[in-house]
Amino acid sequence: MVKQEITQSLVSDDDPLRVWLRDVIIQDPQSPVDAFLTAELDAGEASVIALACEFQCGVLMDERKGRRVASLVYGLQVIGTGRILVEAKERGFVTKIRPLMEQMRAGGYYLSDRLVYALCREVGE
């Protein structure tokens, strides 16, 4: 479900993300996804939460409702893309996060002004 959800948004067959995804194995949950999850969330978020429950691990998720369900209902640790960018800068993998967030926005990814401001302020940008 997750792979399908990601690739549907990609326009070009030679998009770097689509090319990378050709070689990535994305595992679906072994057990049927909880009916509550499928009723409340889209298939991608529901699958991610179900799989995290199976593996007893945290999730990377940005969708607000999915984050709430994962943390409050299932007790999962949730991290978002913004936090990944902050960690990348703190570890020296990137020099600035604002341009990366602006690229994400330009590609149709929603990041609130408030979130961008807070993350940039946190890393001194």
Image (spheres, rainbow, N blue to C red):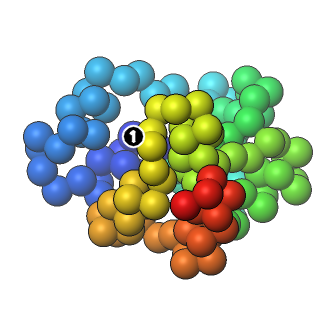
Looking at the rendered structure, the number of numbered marks drawn on it comes to 1
Residue 91 drawn above or below residue 97: above
Residue at 29% over, 54% down: 8
Amino acid at dot 1 = Lys
In-image side of 59 versus 93 (left or right): right
In-image side of 70 versus 47 (left or right): right
Q: From the viewer's side, name the closer residue of 60 and 86.
A: 86
Q: What percent of the width, then of the height, locates residue 103?
A: 33, 60
Residue 124 drawn above or below residue 118: above
Q: From the viewer's side, name the closer residue of 19 and 25.
A: 19
Residue at 24% over, 53% down: 10
Whether residue 109 is visible, yes or no, is yes
Q: From the viewer's side, name the closer residue of 57 and 49.
A: 57
Q: Residue furthest front?
A: 124
Residue at 39% over, 40% down: 3
Residue 105 drawn above or below residue 61: below
Is disc 1 placed on a helix, strand or loop?
helix
Whether residue 84 is visible, yes or no, is no
Q: What percent of the width, then of the height, locates residue 53?
A: 77, 34
Q: What percent of the width, then of the height, locates residue 42?
A: 56, 60
- Mark 1 burial class by Cα count in 10 Å: few <14, some 14-19, many 20+: some
In-image side of 82 versus 77 (left or right): left
Q: Quadrant of the C terminus?
A: bottom right
Q: What percent of the width, then of the height, locates residue 28?
A: 54, 31
Residue at 81% over, 42% down: 76
Find disc 1 in the rendering and name its residue.
3
